[in-house]
Image (cartoon, rainbow, N blue to C red):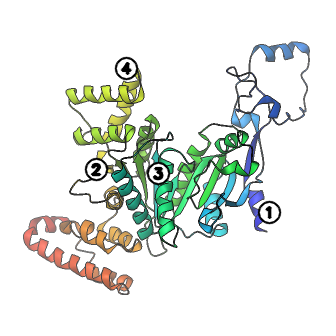
Amino acid sequence: GQKSWIEKTFCKRECIFVIPSTKDPNRCCCGQLTNQHLPPLPSGTASKNEEENKQVETQPEKWFVSKHTQSYPTDSYGMLEFQGGGSSNKAMYIRVSYDTKPDSLLHLMVKDWQLELPKLLISVHGGLQNFEMQPKLKQVFGKGLIKAAMTTGAWIFTGGVSTGVISHVGDALKDHSSKSRGRVCAVGIAPWGIVTRAYQTMSNPLSKLSVLNSSHTHFILADNGTLGRYGAEVKLRRQLEKHISLQKINTRMGQGVPVVGLMVEGGPNVVSIVLEYLREDPPVPVVVCDGSGRASDILSFAHKYCDEGGIINESLRDQLLVTIQKTFNYNKTQSHQLFAIIMECMKKRELVTVFRMGSEDQQDIEMAILTALLKGTKASAPDQLSLALAWNRVDIARSQIFVFGPHWPPSVTPARAMSRWEKQPSMWRTVQEGKKWRQLTRRVWPEKTASQAR
């Protein structure tokens, strides 16, 4: 029954028209070699005369996913066992069309893969090319990411393939699973066409999926009928993240699943991803890992020197433009275009948290992630407290919520929340501390508290 549901619900895509590429006549525009291509479907309406045929030949057709691919029931899904064996090297996977509905995917993840809905979603973005990370930063990044996921019941989303930032995430996951029984839920959302291109160059067909990072627990492979190209996964991943954010953490709370973007190194596309997150409704807060290189370091620099309106002084502006040119080997026009996107990001700089290793206010990246979420959400103090409760993080409540005593609305007393929290003594102690703090702040800031009460 489950098999038939999967094959009825999810599709794969195959290119069904050979349109030779202008760059390589031996390949179709979809990326497949013409001699390995699926034969075109028999056409129902043949060309009326030779003149029409000539016209088609003189005007090369542009390739479109919607026009030149056909969807078929998916035939690639189930359990994937990476070479090397061991339970930690098994993962669930599915090949799906790039336009799959996110509610169907979430249903598969919860019902078929038997995942619990996350209480937090950490979406990691960064460079796809391999890069070195300072050993200390790599250690702090890996430990903090895993701790944030483990203590809150989070899912981690990555690009799934074993290169660039994903291999660094994979190393952290591998290190964790080798020391503990529990596995972090890490979902790789990768393009099917990248996976199959790797397969073509390998002698062993069983190596087909070895391009994927073996430390992940699940893979969603997005298919738009192309081969050897990125892109099919972008919209699918974003829509799935949005759909997950609309799910309620539990029935008693109005709070949806919080999403945070974590940026490590990266090319110019990472800057665009940051802007896309900040423009979401509601916006998605972003943590940028300073010192990891390229786009992340440029965003960190802009964040440090921009004022609240997202304005930077002229000498620093010129310095930033030169850095962009050198980092990405850009000409002046390209540099100015990327600079404009960075400045758009800085208009919402309050939603961007920069993690700087060794800075006094951020001891680890895990706290940067969780505080960025509280900073990013417009939730009231009681809702923020509920979130900290859902994460089971009393320390977050103490350090980040009750510290803003005057902002705790007088109408919502911790006593009203007692029925929800009485079974968790540590959280209740924190609530009581918050109450004392509010009483204290009333004495210190009576006018402010009174005006807020009104």
Above or below, 267 against 428 in this view is above
Circle count: 4
Per the model, the C-alpha gap separating discs 2 and 3 is 18 Å
- Could you tell me residue 230's position as x and y percent? 59, 39
Observer-nearest of 367 and 5: 367
Determine the residue located farthest toward the left in the rendered image: 444
N-terminal of the pair, mark 2 or mark 1, is: 1
Residue indicated by mark 4 = 332
Three-letter code, disc 1? Ser
Per the model, the C-alpha gap separating discs 3 and 1 is 37 Å
The answer to whether the residue labelled 1 contacts the one labelled 4, judged by CB atoms less than 8 Å apart, is no
Within-10-Å neighbours for mark 2: few <14, some 14–19, many 20+:
many
- In which quadrant of the rendered image does the C terminus lie? bottom left
Per the model, the C-alpha gap separating discs 2 and 1 is 50 Å
Residue indicated by mark 3 = 168
Please, what secondary structure does the residue beneath circle 2 have? loop
Residue pictured at 91% horizontal, 26% vertical:
46
N-terminal of the pair, mark 2 or mark 3, is: 3
N-terminal of the pair, mark 1 or mark 4, is: 1
Closest to the camera, between mark 4 and mark 2, is 2
Closest to the camera, between mark 1 and mark 4, is 4
Seen in the image, is 406 located left or right of residue 428?
Answer: left
- Image quadrant in which you'd find residue 412: bottom left
Q: Is residue 99 visible?
A: no
Closest to the camera, between mark 2 and mark 3, is 3
- Could you tell me residue 149's position as x and y percent? 44, 64
Q: Is residue 274 visible?
A: yes
